[in-house]
Amino acid sequence: MNSYIKAQITNIIAMCNVFKQSCELAAKKDDGVINREEEKQLKEINKAVEEFKKRLEKIK
């Protein structure tokens, strides 16, 4: 595999992890608590991110 493409895949996987953490912090930001709706949204985000990361790992 092209080493530059591999590096970009590695970078975006790391950014996915940062995105997940940022979403969790954002959910707590307004009132300090993650409510049911936010929890549901976070689960959907986590699922989508993990699926995306798996697809990228297959390419790598």
Image (tube, rainbow, N blue to C red):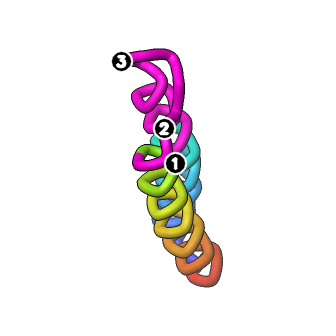
Give the main secondary structure of the magenta stretch: helix
Q: Quadrant of residue 56?
A: bottom right
Asked whether 3 or 36 is in front, the reply is 36
The residue tagged 3 is 30
- Which percent across, then down, holds residue 35? 48, 38
Q: Quadrant of residue 57?
A: bottom right
Q: State the residue at coordinates (59%, 66%).
A: 50
- Which percent across, then down, holds residue 48? 47, 68
Crowding near the residue tagged with mark 1, few <14, some 14–19, many ≥20 C-alpha atoms within 10 Å: some
Labels 2, 3: front one: 2
Crowding near the residue tagged with mark 3, few <14, some 14–19, many ≥20 C-alpha atoms within 10 Å: few
Q: Tell me the quadrant of the picture where the N terminus can be found.
A: bottom right
- The amino acid sitting under disc 1 is Glu
The residue tagged 2 is 35
Asked whether 21 or 39 is in front, the reply is 39
Q: Choose the circle earlier in sequence order: 3 or 1.
A: 3
Q: Tell me the quadrant of the picture where the C terminus can be found.
A: bottom right
The residue tagged 1 is 39
Element at badge 1? helix
Residue 40 appears left or right of 57: left
Do labels 1 and 2 touch, CB within 8 Å? yes
Distance from disc 1 to disc 2, alpha carbons, whole Å, reads 6 Å
Q: State the residue at coordinates (52%, 33%).
A: 34
Distance from disc 3 to disc 1, alpha carbons, whole Å, reads 14 Å
Rendered view: 51 above or below 8:
below
Rendered view: 57 above or below 32:
below
- The amino acid sitting under disc 3 is Asp
Q: Magenta span covers which residues?
A: 20-37
